[in-house]
Image (cartoon, rainbow, N blue to C red):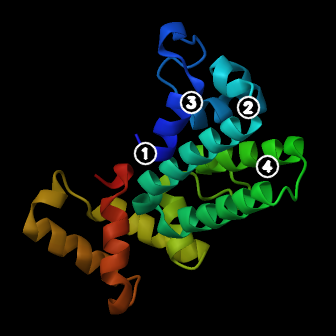
Amino acid sequence: FEPSMRHLIDTYIDAQESKKISGFDDLTIVDLLVKKGAGAIEDLPEGIKKNKNAIAETIENNVRKVIIDEAPTNPKYFEKMSVLLDELIRERKEKAKAYEEYLARITELAKRVGDPGTDSAYPSTMKTSAQRALYDNLGQDEPRALRLHDTIMHTKRDDWQGNIFKIREMKKAIRQHVDDNDLETIYDLIKNQKEYR
């Protein structure tokens, strides 16, 4: 656990009263927010649920963790989500927003972080997370992202990431769509996509 999460657990959760919360199962708080919206707060432990700051910090820490974990799959998108999270945290600390408005906005951000496909900023042609990652990291150039996606799908071979010859073939295919300066960045992005493995 991060120190702030450990502090929350030590401060607000009594180990003797701990019990399984049926709403959690194997879901993270971000997953619950994606699934239930602000209603997910009702599934939090009583000790946290009674404290608005504890709720806010718990959600913020979990959203930040997802952003950090998922950043390699779409750096531009998650960088934008990180900026939005920082802004919400700043506003909350300055008490610039009413708690209910903050909660609505952090819930919406958690949904966008937890399931980027729900973000309405994407064209309808960007159907998969890999396509959205290309779109975001190629300057939101829709035709170029789609062309590169098609090239990758036709070029990738079984276990291509573990074979130097297949990697060279993939980089040669990518080079048709990106400048040499961007080749390694886009290649790293592509190798982090489950769809392209």
Q: Label 1 vs label 4: CA separation?
A: 24 Å
Kind of residue sitting beneath label 1: Glu
The spot of residue 48 in percent (x, y) is 66, 27
| Residue for point 62% across, 61% down | 81
- Check the image and report above or below for 76 versus 7: below
Tell me the element at label 3: helix
Q: Which residue in the structure is indicated by mark 2?
A: 51
For the N terminus, the image quarter is top left
Picture disc at residue 2 = 1
Which label lies toward us, 4 or 2?
2
User: Which is more N-terminal, label 2 or label 4?
Assistant: 2
Q: Amino acid at mark 3?
A: Thr
Numbered badge on residue 105: 4
Of pointers 2 and 1, the one earlier in the residue sequence: 1
Q: Which residue is mark 3?
A: 11
Q: Which residue occupies 25% across, 76% down? A: 171
Task: Where is residue 115? Give x, y as percent.
Answer: 59, 44
Give the CA separation, mark 4 to mark 2. 18 Å
